[in-house]
Image (tube, rainbow, N blue to C red):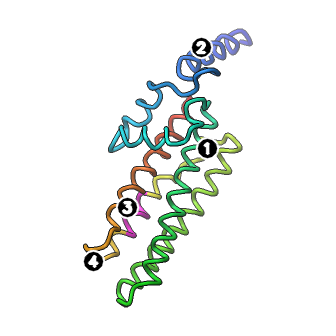
Amino acid sequence: MASYALVRSAIFLLVASMYFSASSGVSQYVLATICGQTQNQETCEEILQSDPRTSSADPPLLSLISLQLAMKRVDRNFDAFSQFRDNTTDPALKIAFENCVTLYQNMKDILRADYKLSQQEKYDRITDLGQLTTLAYNCENGISSSILPTAGITEDMLLIAQTAVYTNSFVAGS
């Protein structure tokens, strides 16, 4: 029984080494595997590769990178919607933007909790990243004006959220 566990561990390490190596980090195959599940594979790969650590990352670091990138985007969007709220004179838009600020605060809370789980290498417990997509859609759908740049903000958020979801799903399975 002990030899079975040893053989199983050796096979896992061999397979994992095909995807990650100490010298090369994340391979194009891994990026394609992760990002091929998103709406836009090329953008997902660009998102992950925007962090210079990705090229030499192991799975735990790749998880952290994806979450950090999502946190940066959420922080920027939170600030943008706060500014929109503070600068509008339209009462309906002020309410809609306040709703977005609240939704983005919820995203911050989710990402902070998931980042802690990633630091603890509890990837199988990172299950709520999909809520980022729902919250971003809820924000966008609550804004009635089509003249605002919020659609682009939402699209970027959705792509970053998908990148984090599929990265952490991959890491949990590796």
Res 71 quadrant in image: bottom right
Give the mark toward the camera: 3 or 2: 3
Q: Residue 14 shows which numbered tag?
A: 2
Res 118 quadrant in image: top right
Bounds of the magenta segment: 133-139
User: In whole angstroms, how far apart are the C-alphas of marks 3 and 2?
Assistant: 40 Å
Task: Work out which quarter of the rendered image holds the N terminus and state it.
Answer: top right
Which residue is disc 3 drawn over?
154
Q: What amino acid is found at the position of numbered circle 3 in the picture?
A: Thr
Q: Position of residue 101 (x, y in %)?
A: 49, 74
User: In whole angstroms, how far apart are the C-alphas of marks 1 and 3?
Assistant: 22 Å
Q: What amino acid is found at the position of numbered circle 1 in the picture?
A: Leu
Q: Is residue 13 above or below residue 79?
A: above
Considering the numbered disc 2 on the image, is that residue within a helix, a strand or a loop?
helix
Residue found at the very far right of the displayed protein: 2
Q: What amino acid is found at the position of numbered circle 4 in the picture?
A: Ser
Q: Is residue 66 above or below residue 34?
A: below
Q: Answer yes or no: do the residues labelled 1 and 3 have beta carbons within 8 Å?
A: no
Residue found at x 58% / y 41%: 63
Which residue is disc 1 drawn over?
64
Q: Is residue 58 above or below residue 65?
A: above
Res 8 quadrant in image: top right
Considering the numbered disc 1 on the image, is that residue within a helix, a strand or a loop?
helix
